[in-house]
Image: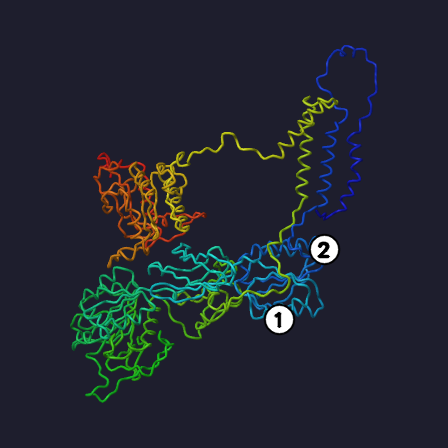
Amino acid sequence: MILTAPWVLWAFVLLPVVWLLLRALPPRPREQSFPPIALLRGLGARNDDVARAPLWLLILRCMAVVLVITACAQPFITRDRAGISMSADTLLVIDNGWAAAPGWTQRLRAVDSILERLARNGHSVRLLLTAPPTGNEVMRVGDAQDPAIMRTILAPSEPQPWGVDRRAATGAVRALLQHGWHGPVLYLADGMATGDDAAFATALRDVGPVHDLRLPDADIVTLAPGHNGAEALDLRLRTVPRPVLRQVSVRAQTIDNSTLQVLHVTMPPDARQADVRLTLPVELRNQLDHVEVDAINGPASVRLLDENDRRRPVGLISGNASDTPLMGSLFYLRRALAPGAELREGTLDTLLSRPLSILIAPDGTLGSPDARHKVEEWVRRGGTLIRFSGPLLVQAAGGTGIAPPVPADGPRTDTPPAEITSRDIHGANTSVTDTSVADTLLPVPLMDGERVLGGAMSWSKPEHLAAFDARSPFHDLPVPADVTVSKQVLARPSTDLDTHTWARLVDGTPLVTHAALGAGQVVLFHVTSTADWSNLPLSGLFVGMLQRLGERAVGIETPADQSLLSPYMTLDGAGVEGPPPAGAQAVRADAFGHIAVSAAHPPGLYGPRASRRALNIGDDAGEMLPQQPVGTVMDLRGQTPDLALGPILAVLALGLVLVDGIAAILMRSGMIRAGGGRTNGRRAGLVSAVILAALASAPSAPAWAETRDVPGAALETRLGYIITNHADIDDVSREGLQGLSDYVNARTSAVLGHPDALVPERDDLSYYPMIYWPVTADATATPARTAALNAYMRHGGILMIDTQGQDPATAQAGNDDSFTGSAPGTAAALRRMTAGLDIPPLTKLDDHHVLTHTFYLLHDFPGRYDGMPVWVAQEGDSTNDGVSPVIIGSNDWAHAWAVDDSGGTPYATIPDGPEQRTLAYRFGVNAVLYALTGNYKADQVHVPAL
């Protein structure tokens, strides 16, 4: 024990004086004869006034005085296991870049204990933060400060969302040396090496002895970009190697922090990277906002996504012979679009029944007015139509020409008047005559026939492509010299033709034209999608052009190479989104993916909404290697704040004063006599001991609170879930049933407790009206489990079996109305799990089943996903009094019901969001009340009300 103010102990000199004062007697009263007093001589006194405090009470009071004096001396017990000397003014160097974010709270706690000791010893401290400051400030060592003031400055601080600059830090240390300052150095390193470490370490050693404090269990990770493939979004988890096996969880989330997928990654000892593969349906994948690493704080563990990381659905209208190799109308389109888009092929009605970003119509696929009307309505709502020319389009033109698109705000008619005005949203006017049925899905009016360039009967040669204009979305694509056009459909000349042309031949004739239609856009290639009219589909330029159109279709206008994108939202040192700092600057559009995060360019989203790009630490973090020791390496966790004994001693002194007061009251009441005697002394000592014991001991639990060997489900109604031995799935089952129980309690008269995890072979299932059983690909059945579940169902229990998605092996082609996740292997697992169960014949759940109107009137039964059938026992089955013993589905109800510790719903529901989650809760309420009441609502007396 060490005393901060030992001079206070001189007060112990006064302790004998205190003792004498407590034993002093009042002056002896003067005696006066008074005859009538004799009448009172026979009366017995009820109370004896204390003339002098008893010895035990004097000792008690002296102990209180001793405790007060000792508390004023401010004693403490040092708990510094690192053994760092605090005997001189100190230079405190802290790595406060993004790599220090994991364990930042522990770092601040260690700094606080160091500053506390420096303040106690009366030494000053200088501070150097190695992450560059914001703005144009120059990195330098701070002036000498009182450690107590420095504690208040550092307590609310956070790491910076950019890396350290040890070169600038070396310059700051050299500047300090030039002023002649030397002393001990305390360096809190982040543990990640940089290219300037050697010079930095030398500079610190020149200042004085270096204590290098490290946090050995801190994980430094970044999420680097990978391949955005057709099947999955691939990322790369990079880390500073550590000699231990590590388990890392990666979470994919939407903009409202709803979780779409959680992946568990195992990293072997000394591993530097691991691949992360996100496999999601395109509807879910395009809702991804960011990917983060669980339990690791900081901006490096968060990867923001932009449109380049998404795959937009592209519809290809199929026609006759469209699949013919090398000659089919979709052959080259598939190969050009597959690397960066979600391709869907089929008839027009099939494609328009699901969300689409782009619709591609080869020659002849929009021949009927009805098809063009449907597509026009779709384009007006924001879709992008890409059309290709060909013989059928030329034949449709005949000799009369083709009408231009109708105004975006004007009426639509399939038979326009004889005199029609060429007009798009830009407002050009060109007179064209047409007496045929109009094709309203063309960006510009076309001339009759096709233009032939080259060939045996022609003097001309195939034309090359001209360089793209700066206004064109293809402006940054190089034009190959070997790409030529031998046939094309010509656009009718007009005053505004240039404004609608994105690509042209060297002779100036348009190759690609466009026009706005409502909220959408129509694009026309004046050549075929095959190699018949041009070798453009054989070139890499074709791929780039379609990619640019795809980006534009989702609202991205590709900026010019030198254009600047201003910061819109950035990440702070904890990885939380917020407004950009004052010193944040714009980034050139062509620098994304190459530029490193810095104080001028913090991680975040840049640019306007139409062309927003993401800048992440993992884009260019460099090689991640462990930092070499700078000085004497010590465990940062050994810096524990000292234990102050002053407050503890003061509380004890207060307790003794309280005991003294209680003893005085008892002596005045006569329960304790102070007049001496062995009996009185023992009684007083016993009372004091009882009082002290009562103050020192915590109140014990009441006798009626004894634990009894009674299951909690026997005392309250609870739902149960079967353990799968997959921690993530079991956690979702628990959170889901807890969320459902809370919903049931809030909206019905039923009262449910918290859900229980169950092992059928071990636990008594009879207490639970309904048990949730998620299916995993590795699930197996045992005879004991099958017997327990059969007994449970025979006695009225209901099993809710959920595959939490659809097995791709059993998915039905053309089932476009369902939105479900992928659950490989669950179909075979479901057969294994239910092989020995007594399940009656099943039927699809429909509106007539009791389950659909037990509490709410329902027509759909979604979970996290929607559209998959739900199976129940056929009505009329006499088993279990007509109540279905099983409910089997694939809509993943647990994720939709799940509520986390903060009360939020962490998992997104697809496709209808909050409305779908409400229906999922209502279906859960119906299922619970169905399990509690059976076929009660099937009675005919309820039919009129229903």
* Residue 533 x/y as whole percent: 24, 79
In the displayed structure, does residue 670 sit left or right of residue 340?
right
Q: Amino acid at mark 2?
A: Gly
In the displayed structure, does residue 173 sit left or right of residue 276?
right
| Quadrant in the rendering for residue 562 | bottom left
Query: Between 102 and 785, which is closer to the camera in this rendering?
Result: 785
Query: Between 796 and 572, which is closer to the camera in this rendering?
Result: 796
In the displayed structure, does residue 483 sit left or right of residue 237?
left
Q: Amino acid at mark 1?
A: Ala
From where the camera sits, is residue 141 visible?
A: yes
From where the camera sits, is residue 930 visible?
A: no
- At 38% from the left and 71% from the top, the residue drawn is 558
Reply above or below: 86 against 663: below
**Secondary structure type for disc 1:** helix
In the displayed structure, does residue 8 sit left or right of residue 931?
right
C-alpha span from label 2 to label 1: 32 Å
> Could you classify mark 2 by the number of other residues whose Cα lies within 10 Å: few (under 14), some (14-19), or many (20 or more)?
some
* Residue 925 x/y as whole percent: 33, 42
Reply above or below: 505 against 876: below
Kindly identify which residue carries mark 2: 122
Please tell me which of labels 2 and 1 falls first in the chain. 2
- At 72% from the left and 36% from the top, the residue drawn is 63
Kindly identify which residue carries mark 1: 199
